[in-house]
Structures are given as structure tokens and as C-alpha cells.
Image: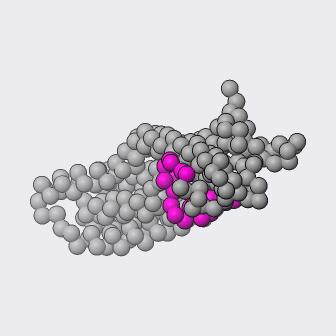
């Protein structure tokens, strides 16, 4: 056991930390199977280096996963309270999956012999590189997430502004003032970041999702004098930190608010 202490330490650290980039919000948008593969590879390579102690590292990987996930959900609770309430179940499910995958990987790796010292060094190097996934992902997370959020917010602002221009062009065309709700007509007057063909069928009166933002036009199709175009992050702060809106006044604001006088939502200006 003492001889395997360095291997156990690395497996514990890797198995616990590699889940944090997946659960810390805003996330890196990594799939849940990515840390699962990382843990399985660490367990398998540790089994090879230890001379075949597959059961030990399957148990260690599973226990470290459970502790790492529970600690992560406690330190960085999910923004969605309902999702957070299921975090314990998610941690247990991930632990069981890790134990099963690590068990299978470990059994397969018992058939891999280390024939010489040079091969052992190569496996150690691969083992440490895989184990470094979690810390490396945490290190690059701020820059990657910051770039994604800035891009999402830029595109959302551009779409809201371009949609406003398209609505105004459509309203001023002869015979078109009440055709704002027709996606095909609105699309011809739109010049901005693209929407899909399906989006144009639903965008008036509904919300469509593009680049992390839910974007829609609130309008009474029987009279297009009043309308509200809004964009909100689809997954909260994981997709963006700002909201955008614009109405018939043409001023871009930070979100809708209820107008008691007009009995409708209007675009609220951003606080200075």
C-alpha cells in the first residue's frame, strides 16, 4: 500500500477535481462523459503502474468522485434551485458510473505488462497528463467562458437591433404594416446575425434560441403599433450576464417592465 501511495494520491486528486469544470457556473459546456473518461483512464493507468491492483483504484476513483462532486455542489451551488436539489442524486449516479467504468478499465489494464523501465516512464507521463485535466480546465475556464459570454452578448445585441430595424422597415412598406408577424416578410428586411428558417416561423409571438440567448418579438399581430423585442440568456449566467430589449421607441434597454398606464410590457432603459 505504501508503494502505491503516490498513485492513490494522484487518482484521488484527479477523480475529485476533474468534475469541477463541469459543475462550476458559468460552465465550460463540457459533456458529463468527459470527466468520466478522465477518471477511467487514471484508474486504468494506475492499475498498470501498480502491477494490477484494479479493485483498489476502482474503489478509490469512485470514493474520490463522490467527495469531489458533493464538495463542488456545496461550494458552488447551481443557479437553478431545482437542479441543485437533485445534485446529491447526480453525485451518487456519477459515482456508480465511475465505479463500473473504472472496474472494467482496470480489469482490461491488468493484461498490459510493463516490459521495461522506459515503458514505465511513458505510462507515468501519460498518467500525469490525464490527471492534469481538471486543474488545466479550471485554469483556462475564465478566459474561455469570458470569450463565450462576450460573443453571446454581442450577437444578442446585434440581433435585437437588427430585428428592430427589420420590424420598422416592414411596417413602413406599403401594404405591410400588419405583416410583421409573417416570418418570411420580416426575414427579407432583416440584416444581422443569422436565424434559422424554423426561427423565422416562430419568432413573432414566441422565443427562439440562438447562441445562448432566447430572442423573441412580443406583438399583437392585429395591430403592429406596439411591440417589444427582447433577448435573455437561456441558461442564466452560463450563457450571458446581460439582457437586451427594444420597443417601438427605438431605444435599446436592459429588459422589459410592466407599464401600468399602457397595460403592457415596455423596454426599460439601462440604469446609469
Magenta residues (range): 189-212
- Camera-side residue of 138 and 8: 138
Q: In the image shown, does 205 or 79 lie closer to the viewer?
A: 205
Question: Percent position (x, y) of residue 6?
Answer: 32, 50
- x, y percent for residue 3: 29, 54
Q: Is residue 257 visible?
A: yes
Q: Is residue 156 left or right of residue 64?
A: right
The magenta stretch spans residue 195? yes
Residue under the image location 61 percent in, 47 percent down: 169
In the rendered image, is residue 253 in sight? no
Q: Is 170 placed left or right of 62 in the picture? A: right
Look at the image and say whether residue 188 sits in the magenta stretch: no
Position in image of residue 48 (x %, y %): 25, 63
**Quadrant housing the C terminus:** top right
Q: Is residue 191 positioned above or below 195 on the image?
A: above
Question: Which quarter of the figure is the N terminus placed in?
Answer: bottom left
Taking the spot 40% from the left edge, 42% from the top edge, the residue there is 140
Amino acid at each position: 500500500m505504501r508503494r502505491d501511495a503516490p498513485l492513490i494520491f494522484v487518482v484521488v486528486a484527479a477523480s475529485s477535481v476533474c468534475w469541477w469544470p463541469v459543475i462550476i457556473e458559468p460552465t465550460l459546456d463540457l459533456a458529463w462523459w468527459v470527466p468520466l473518461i478522465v477518471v477511467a483512464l487514471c484508474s486504468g493507468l494506475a492499475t498498470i503502474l501498480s502491477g494490477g491492483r484494479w479493485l483498489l483504484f476502482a474503489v478509490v476513483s469512485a470514493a474520490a468522485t463522490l467527495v469531489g462532486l458533493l464538495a463542488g455542489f456545496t461550494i458552488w451551488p447551481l443557479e437553478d434551485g431545482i437542479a441543485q436539489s437533485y445534485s446529491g442524486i447526480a453525485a451518487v449516479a456519477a459515482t456508480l458510473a465511475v465505479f463500473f467504468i473504472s472496474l472494467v478499465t482496470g480489469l482490461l489494464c491488468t493484461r498490459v505488462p510493463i516490459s521495461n523501465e522506459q515503458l514505465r516512464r511513458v505510462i507515468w507521463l501519460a498518467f500525469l497528463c490525464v490527471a492534469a485535466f481538471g486543474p488545466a480546465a479550471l485554469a483556462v475556464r475564465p478566459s474561455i467562458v469570458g470569450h463565450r459570454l462576450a460573443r453571446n452578448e454581442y450577437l444578442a445585441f446585434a440581433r435585437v437591433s437588427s430585428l428592430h430595424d427589420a420590424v420598422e422597415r416592414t411596417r413602413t412598406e406599403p401594404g405591410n404594416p400588419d405583416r410583421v408577424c409573417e416570418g418570411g416578410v420580416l426575414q427579407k428586411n432583416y440584416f444581422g446575425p443569422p436565424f434559422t428558417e424554423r426561427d423565422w416561423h416562430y419568432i413573432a409571438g414566441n422565443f427562439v434560441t440562438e447562441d445562448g440567448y432566447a430572442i423573441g418579438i412580443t406583438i399583437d399581430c392585429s395591430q403592429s403599433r406596439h411591440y417589444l423585442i427582447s433577448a435573455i440568456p437561456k441558461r442564466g449566467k452560463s450563457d450571458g450576464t446581460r439582457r437586451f430589449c427594444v420597443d417601438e421607441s427605438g431605444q435599446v434597454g436592459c429588459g422589459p417592465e410592466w407599464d401600468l398606464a399602457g397595460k403592457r410590457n415596455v423596454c426599460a432603459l439601462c440604469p446609469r
